[in-house]
Amino acid sequence: MSRIELKNIDKFFGDNHVLRNLNLVIEDGDFMTLLGPSGCGKTTLLRVVAGLEKPQNGTMTIDGVEIINAADALFVEPSKRDLNLVFQSYALWPHMTAYNNVAFGLKIKKIPAAKIEEMVMKSLRLMRIDELKDRYPNELSGGQQQRVAIARAIASEPKLILLDEPLSNLDAKLRIDMRAELKRLHREIGATIIYVTHDQIEALTMSTKIALFEEGCLAQVAPPMELYMNPIDLVAADFIGNPRINFLKGTASYSNEKLHVKINIGEYDFDKEDMTEEPIPEGEFPCVVGLRPEQVYIHTEAVESSIPATIYAGQPAGSETLVTLTVGGQEFLAKEIGLKDYEMGQTVYLEIDPNKLNVYDEKSTRLIKLAV
Amino acid sequence: MANKIKHPLTGKRLKNLILGVVSNPFNMVVFISLILLISLIIVPLFTMLRETVTLAASELRRVDGEIGDFTLYYWKYVFASKLSSAVLWTPLRNSLLIGIFVTAISVPLGSILAWLVVRSDIPGKRLLSMLVIIPYMIPSWCKALSWLAMFRNSRSGHLGFFAGLGINIPDWLAYGPFAIISVMVLHYYAFAYIMVSGSLRSVNSELEEMGEIQGASKLQILKSITMPLVLPSILSAAIMTVSKSVGSYGVAANLGTRIGYFTLATKMKEFINVGPHAVGYVMSILLIVMATGTIFANRLFLGHRRSFETMGGKGTRHTPIPLGMSKYPLLIFIVVFLLVAMVMPLFVLLMETFQKSTGMGYSLDNLTLYNWIGRLEDATWQVDYPGIFRNPEFGRAVWNTLRLTVVASIITAFCGQLLGYISSRGRGKWYGSLTEQLVFIPYLMPGVAFSAIYFAMFAKPSLFGLIPSLYGTFTLIVLVSVVKHFPFASRAGTANMLQIGTELEEAADIAGASFWRRMIRIVIPLAKQGFISGFMLIFISIAKELDLIIIMMTPQTRTMSYLAFQYSRDAMPQMADAISVCVLVFILISYRIANHFGADIGKSWG
Ligand SMILES: Nc1ncnc2c1ncn2[C@@H]1O[C@H](COP(=O)(O)OP(=O)(O)O)[C@@H](O)[C@H]1O
Ligand SMILES: [Mg+2]
């Protein structure tokens, strides 16, 4: 029920240019995640959308209605934007019970008391904390506080819900539970959600779309799997994926609608249809090939077109095993499911699907060949 | 890419800009506060400055010109006249001497005590740490009375404790610089103690243990690890002590003026009393310049080193450092010090209130309750005043003190929270720093100089007759007390407001709560606790105050502190002592209550 369009947003704190000419469209019903390392301006963007910060430049519309127009000094008040925000700190009012925290905004809206009660209990029940309604925030655990904060944000049924790293203060197990919970919530209430996180697993598992931030600019906006498969530049590729993607340096040249790539572990040809629109340099040029660790298959015997490699070190971790390998002086990481045991220095044979490789122009750092 | 985005000023933009400012009540609150601060702090200061170069009626005989003409007469009077030596140089030398000696003794004393109590394994630390700060709760003018109770000699008609024992007490011991310095040391050592012990507590003992692991001896550790870490706080204690003692009035007046020993502050008061007023104003400017100078020197020296204080921070564990053999001698030293410096003077002071003749011992026939409850007609010996509880002057003073402390501290605490709100929410914005700076100014001024400013401003009608002459009114005394306590109150308010996260308010903002609603429903309920403890500390500080209000006193507005001072000068020591006992009891009870509400005496600036 809510389509948000941000255009040319600039935000400065003093001389610190935090948001740089930012353009972003969030479609109605999206679960849009703003993903990026700490300090890149995600919270700032969220606060701009909420109306808690005024950008120096740019416009924002919600469902076509102008909410921000910096040139006209138009900034609609936060409470008139029909949205709600869950702060990273939760910002629960410590002197009010969970019930009153949720009811506060409804009382201000002059909703009849009976209706307030119904709405508060509905959202408390939705977050499964209705039996905690009379507790004060300091009598609740971190996870419970967080549910109260979300209940407070959804009680008035806003069209847009903003969440700022809501899971970052929870322990690992609770975080996984809450991920599922939030995903279900999005489905149930159908509101548009903007979700801020620096945790790529959260972003990849919950969102319908991810906006990847780099230093106040948007690097890439794409659905999670697309972002994972084809990060648009080297920085994005480096950021997305755990363990990190392997970068193998080599050279490439483009002729006869074919991209020829030469790296330590072999030479590959790619069709034009798998390539991006990026301009390709003339002649032979340095390139970087991105290879996801889970795309490396390790065999103990040679198989067809396999590449011999030496085991440098293995790190078995129960459900998976990370293996560091060397091929001709090039070191890289492979990830295997389950427990595997290798000896140091052992020779193994690698199978790699060339289609799954990303190729980047080293100079422009941009993606030139897609993984398919 | 600098922050230089300029949008053309269209009608629509202008309308929105104006709407944005006007529709936000916070802006109005800031605006009104800034106006008030400027008219309560900056305007009086400039009024006084102007008075020093404006010819007044009383000097027409000596200076050509008309009333209101520009003149340098008063500045010349102070700096370049036959009287300069008596008016300026001697009092200035005396003030500096007092400041330097007080600092040189009290800061090392306080620092050593702090180290012993915080870091060493001296026995009875908890009790000691409470006892050593008690002198700080006692107003310094009470200490001066105690000193007199001990050391008065025949010069003032009533013998003190020692003179009564037949010991010949010379004038230099009873009155003058030695007495003033001793009394002030007993006040300011506790100030240094509070500052240094605070910083010692923040030093993690692991830092010292690291030194020990590296093989440093205890002395080396003290010298090269502990000292550098607490040095900034020792230095600032020193600077603050210089600044405070140079400008302090009560002690110097009570122990100095009766033998003609003047400091800048007491001399200034003299001129404010008998004129020319403007000479007093010139001297008060000098006092302000001196106090300000030392404090800015502090900032200059320590600006970057202050950051040490926060370094201890996390997990400040304290492994006491063993004193070994010297443990008990040191303990005895502290106990003797506390006995001599605190217990005995207070005891003598208290006992004087039960004596018919001071200095005549504690035999039963010299003891009486007359000084408290006696009627003049029942007196069996030569006495010309009734007991304190029968004395209408005392009743009035109690009423004035109560009314002043309650009214002024409530107003101050409220203003402090409001100013704190503005400074905390305006962190890094122009109005936030302007508020902080304006509010800080009264801190730079010695109390007696500060009230001289208000005297200059309000002794005659001001603002073109809009404000009538307030001299002699209760309002003016309240006003002076309120504004002088702004720095502390707003610091307390800022700390209080900072602990209420802005996000709590933003969450209410998003929920649709207006500014006033946010104040009433979110900020005030959360600020209550801090408000009460701030209020109590202000309350106590105003109850102790003498320097600040002495210029404003008239027979109708006298407070207990002033009355005690007055009686002491009028050679009625039992009366003066009885009042100070009342004040002491009142203050100690207030501290007890304040403590109950979580106020920390270490945070008061008394
Ligand atoms: N109120 C503020 N005043 C000044 N600088 C700020 C303020 N809020 C954020 N910043 C700066 O803006 C940058 C982005 O901050 P933020 O949006 O909080 O990043 P993120 O949420 O991605 O970690 C940081 O460099 C931060 O220091
Ligand atoms: Mg953030």
Image: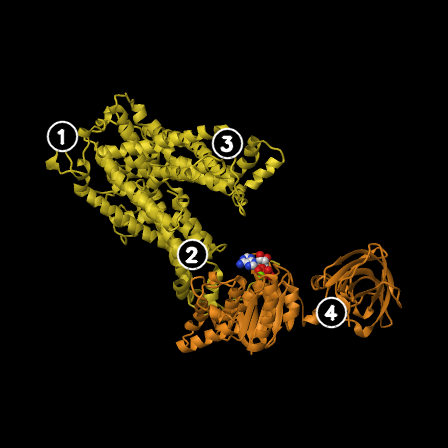
**Chain identity for the colour yellow used in the image:** B
Of the two numbered discs 1 and 3 on the same chain, state the one appearing first in sequence: 3
What hue does chain A carry in this figure? orange
Residue hosting label 2 = B421
Any part of residue B189 in sight: yes
Q: Element at badge 1?
A: loop
Q: Element at badge 4?
A: helix
Q: Element at badge 2?
A: helix
Please check whether the numbered discs 1 and 3 fall on a single chain.
yes
Task: Note whether A208 is above or below B275 in the view shown.
Answer: below
The residue at 67%/72% (across/down) is A223
Identify the chain of the residue marked 4, using the numbered disc in the image: A
- Name the image colouring: by chain
Residue hosting label 4 = A229
The N terminus of chain B, quarter of image: bottom right
Q: Using the numbered discs, state the Cα–Cα distance from disc 4 to disc 2 in whole angstroms.
A: 50 Å
Number of numbered labels in the structure image: 4
Q: Where residue B390 appears, x then y in whole percent?
A: 16, 41
